[in-house]
Amino acid sequence: FLGGGPPHQDMWEIKTEAPKGIRGPFKPIATNVSGIQIGECFPKIAQIMDKSIVMRAVVGCEGRHNSFQCMTGFRHAELRSIGGHPALGSVLHRLQGPADKSVPPYVGMKTAGVWRDPGTPGFLGGTFAPFIPDGEGLANMKLNGITTDRLGNRKQLLKSIDRLRRDVDARGTLEAVDAYEQRAFDVLSSSKLINALALPKEAPEIRKRYGTGKPYQFQYDGASTNNELILMARRLVEVGVRCVSLTFGRWDSHGNNEGLVRHHGTRIDQAVAALVTDLEERGMLDDVTVLVWGEFGRTPRINKNAGRDHWPQVSCAYMAGGGMRGGQAIGSTNRLGEHARTRPVDVKEIFATVYKNLGIDTRTTTISDPAGRPQYLTDMDPIAEVG
């Protein structure tokens, strides 16, 4: 999640013919796919364009400064009275369960800043919330000298207590706690998750390929450009996590848009290109979908502070893997980058595509809300061009 709203016209579709005051300072560069050019800050992605898809005219953005729509595919107000729609990772947890009981199905990398929400379980409840492996979450995963035998005995004690509490709980809160405790015991009894989070165990040449994203700049109250989280995401998926979400950078470029894009862009370029290449080398690329986007685009006109302001009318997205046909630039905006000119792609189409890649038919699959009503995962079809 590119929290803050990345500038669509400075990334995947450079507006060379726009007048001064709208055209940014960035130049287009050739990719390894004939006829497709992208912004100069993304030379490494340019070299894997044959495995990549850029969507230049994403529509349906709500215009809110948070990750909710990018995590769920729905607007924030929809079903808000019952908790709102669940994030994709929570849906996968509900529908497919854990791939390995010792590994959480859904991990959210929660970094510092206001645009760091890794996704919420919505009406599914706390049982399906993401596991956040930092702070208390990571500290509580350590055995602190307790043997697995003692852990098992404590588990039996907790079970007997929880049976009593469960009978008097009417809202499902304690059930969520019980499920989290069960997950914690499973995790504590296995080293898979701990090892996946231990980056020093990764080969030095792979770590160098991803880079660190340092020095961090333009962070303010947002997330850092921590490339190592993207490497960690690959390690987590490799051991069985179904969905990993993270926020990368703070893209709210009301001032010095050029400086921000040059800093953030080159770092996400390195990390994403490394991820896609790494997944391919490991034979995982067809099974893993990579999605990079923010909550909206930026204004066509550059403001008096050399920045771009909020522009929900059109945005952009990058995708790779998942068995999709790469080497595509889908859609376009008009000459000024104001709105979609050809093939607008709706936020919900992107979600339908991700679900399809995961083997879920969104035309027939539903999840039940607290009232027992079936709720569809999206009301649009997958992107036909990538299928």
Image (spheres, grey):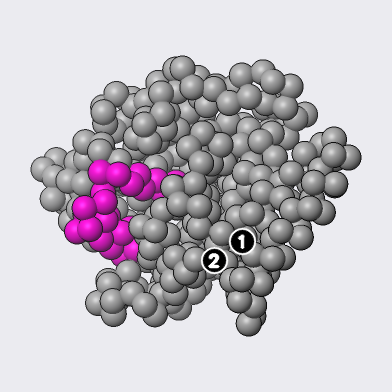
Question: In x, y percent, where is residue 310?
Answer: 57, 44
Question: Tag 1's secondary structure?
Answer: helix
Question: In x, y percent, where is residue 234?
Answer: 37, 59
In the rendering, which numbered label is found on residue 185?
A: 1
- Examine the rendered structure and indicate whether residue 190 appears above or below residue 100: below
Bounds of the magenta span?
269-293
Quarter of the image for residue 326 reads top left
Question: In x, y percent, where is residue 4?
Answer: 56, 52
As drawn, which residue projects farthest toward the right? 168
Q: Are marks 1 and 2 in contact (CB under 8 Å)?
A: yes
Residue type, numbered disc 2: Ser
- Left or right, residue 363 beside residue 312: left
Residue at left offset 63%, top offset 47% = 129
Magenta segment includes 113: no
Observer-nearest of 38 and 368 = 368
- Left or right, residue 354 beside residue 247: left
Res. 216 in view:
yes
Magenta segment includes 276: yes
Residue where numbered disc 2 is placed: 189
Q: Quadrant of the C terminus?
A: top left
Observer-nearest of 291 and 98 = 98
Question: In x, y percent, where is residue 188?
Answer: 57, 67
